[in-house]
Image (cartoon, grey):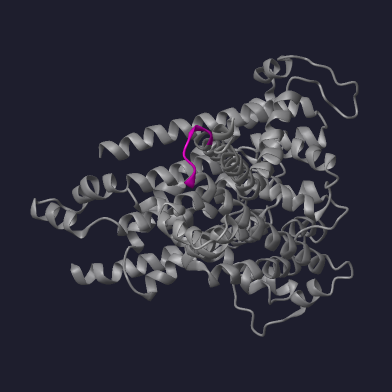
């Protein structure tokens, strides 16, 4: 017994040491994440299987009823369509505009530095501030339309009040705010391309367009990945701008997004079970889109 | 041809930037104009400038701006520091542990990066209610800590790999416990990572709208960002006051950003260039 007992205390001490290390360094962060992200996801999934509504007790299990009624819910389908349109427009505008601006501003000196900061300022502003700024410009008797009237346009468009226009106006405001992010990421990408590659391409007889297609674009692959994924996810989460600019209108849900629909259904309509089903679907979609976009774009990074 | 190009680029750049900046310019000049001047000549410079709009926001009888400012400052400062401390420790711990458990934990945390706030907000209010923290400032702070730990861990765990393990082992041999090794050796070396985490969180949390709107609710007062939203309902026509409120609410975070601008852009572009 004697010789066997000897090594045990240190090992127990070591495992106690390991445990206290975990408790001090890892536990606080993991606990916060568990209690306020993982548990809420679990609760949302559980609620999505019930008819929970604090003003209409009792709460019962309804199985997949909420999920199966989503495809025939016009409000949900409208929100899904709107979210897709917003995410698509934002991704296209910020990437195309961001790349063009980055190429334009890719020069040294205080002048170009100052212009870069100009594009970045909206990124630091809150979405609420940006939305209120654009609202004062775009409402029916706002700054833009009074200017258009002075220029002789009798009946200027209702940027936020015309149901066929409002969704594009909201997308534009979101894209305007996110543009600077893409500019900065593309500029960093451009500046990381070795100058020798351009010289070699020029010696081979490539003009500016060919140099862009064969050197710049492939070398920018990582920047394209970041910007596309960030804009897609950002567009998919859109909430603040909708609430401030249009509150989901004009008319029933013409600019409502998935995030807006989830919050409205849960906190205004109190249909928590149904809202949770929407939330679960939204989470699955964001996850799928992020994974697919990352896979596709990273494949391009490797092959180029 | 080259002469033409030489001035074409700065000219185009200046034109595009001015057009892009016009909305921000409109707010800036109209903060210092009277209501009648805003309507009759929105684009002109405020000559002579008036301080009436600023003054009326600062001296509102309900103190909306001041209460909002205090709440925003408290929530932002405490959340930033807590997330940084907690995720630096966790990021370091996970990056230094081998084994499947650490890997699985890491992947689980990274999945949290893509969870939209709207998806988990209803259940978060229930968790906070169960903890007795709903409609309180500590409740909002706890919610931010949980939500932003994955981002912090991502940044810190990546940075830990640039710190030689020998430094930590040397400190341990000198008799320092794990707590001292971390806070006196590792954490100071991670200053660039801490800086980008602090700045991103500062901007995100100060500007957040949905979480304070729902978690703080109307009872406990609100943050400046939610305050702007509440104020536009009341003074729909009074552009000057709304602009002044937005200007004052943005000033602190803008100064904070300008002071640490370099870290912000560095953190943002880290992934874009490493190829």
* Quadrant housing the N terminus of chain B: bottom left
Q: Residue at x 77, y 32 (%)?
A: A265
Q: Is residue A293 visible?
A: yes
Q: Residue at x 68, y 42 (%)?
A: A31
The residue shown at (48%, 55%) is A181
- Residue A300 to residue A45: above or below: below
Report x, y in % for residue A217: 28, 46
Q: Is residue A170 left or right of residue B67?
A: left
Judge whether residue B99 is colored magenta. yes
**Above-or-below relation of B112 to A72:** below
Lateral position of residue A262 relative to residue A121, left or right: right
Identify the residue at the far bottom of this view.
Answer: B48
- Horizontal placement of A25 versus A102: left or right? right
How many circles with numbers are drawn on the protein? 0
Image position, residue A227 (x, y; %): 44, 46
> In the image shown, does B13 or A121 lie closer to the viewer?
A121
The boundaries of the magenta stretch are B96-101
């Amino acid at each position: 017994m004697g010789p066997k007992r000897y090594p045990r205390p240190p090992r127990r001490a070591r495992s106690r040491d390991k445990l206290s290390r975990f408790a001090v360094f890892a536990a606080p962060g993991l606990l916060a994440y568990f209690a306020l992200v993982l548990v809420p996801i679990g609760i949302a999934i559980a609620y999505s299987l019930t008819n929970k509504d604090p003003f209409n007790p009792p709460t019962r299990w309804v199985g997949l009823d909420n999920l199966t009624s989503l495809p025939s819910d016009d409000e949900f389908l409208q929100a899904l369509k709107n979210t897709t349109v917003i995410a698509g427009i934002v991704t296209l505008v910020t990437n195309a505009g961001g790349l063009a601006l980055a190429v334009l501003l890719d020069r040294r000196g205080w002048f170009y530095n100052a212009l870069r900061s100009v594009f970045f300022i909206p990124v630091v502003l809150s979405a609420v501030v940006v939305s209120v700024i654009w609202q004062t410009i775009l409402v029916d008797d706002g700054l833009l339309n009074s200017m258009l009237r002075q220029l002789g346009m009798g009946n200027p468009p209702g940027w936020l009040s015309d149901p066929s226009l409002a969704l594009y106006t909201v997308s534009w405001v979101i894209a305007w705010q996110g543009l600077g992010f893409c500019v900065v990421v593309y500029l960093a990408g451009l500046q990381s391309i070795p100058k020798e590659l351009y010289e070699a391409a020029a010696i081979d007889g490539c003009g500016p367009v060919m140099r862009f297609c064969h050197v710049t674009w492939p070398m920018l692959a990582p920047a394209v990945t970041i910007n596309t994924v960030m804009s897609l996810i950002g567009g998919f989460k859109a909430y603040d701008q909708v609430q401030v600019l249009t509150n989901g209108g004009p008319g029933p849900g013409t600019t409502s997004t998935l995030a807006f629909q989830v919050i409205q259904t849960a906190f205004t309509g109190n249909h928590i079970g149904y809202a949770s089903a929407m939330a679960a679907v939204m989470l699955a979609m964001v996850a799928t889109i992020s994974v697919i976009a990352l896979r596709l774009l990273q494949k391009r990074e490797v092959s180029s | 041809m080259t002469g033409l190009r030489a001035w074409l680029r700065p000219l185009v750049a200046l034109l595009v930037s001015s057009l892009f900046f016009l909305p921000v310019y409109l707010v800036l000049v109209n903060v210092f104009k009277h209501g009648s001047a805003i309507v009759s000549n929105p684009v002109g410079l405020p000559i002579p400038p008036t301080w009436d709009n600023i003054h009326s926001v600062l001296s509102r009888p309900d103190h909306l701006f001041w209460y909002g400012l205090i709440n925003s400052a408290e929530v932002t400062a405490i959340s930033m520091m807590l997330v940084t401390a907690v995720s630096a420790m966790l990021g370091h711990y996970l990056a230094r542990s081998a084994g499947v458990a650490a890997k699985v934990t890491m992947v689980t945390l990274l999945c949290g990066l893509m969870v939209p706030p709207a998806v988990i907000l209803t259940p978060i209010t229930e968790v906070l209610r169960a903890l007795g923290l709903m409609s309180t400032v500590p409740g909002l702070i706890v919610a931010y800590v949980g939500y932003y730990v994955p981002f912090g861990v991502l940044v810190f765990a990546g940075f830990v790999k640039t710190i030689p393990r020998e430094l930590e082992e040397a400190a341990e041999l000198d008799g320092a416990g794990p707590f001292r090794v971390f806070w006196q050796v590792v954490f100071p070396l991670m200053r660039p990572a801490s800086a980008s985490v602090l700045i991103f969180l500062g901007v995100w949390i100060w500007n957040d709208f949905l979480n304070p709107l729902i978690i703080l609710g109307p009872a406990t007062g609100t943050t400046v960002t939610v305050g702007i939203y509440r104020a536009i309902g009341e003074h729909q026509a009074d552009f000057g006051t709304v602009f002044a409120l937005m200007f004052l609410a943005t000033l602190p975070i803008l100064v904070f950003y300008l002071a640490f601008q370099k870290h912000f852009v560095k953190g943002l572009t880290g992934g874009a260039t490493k190829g």
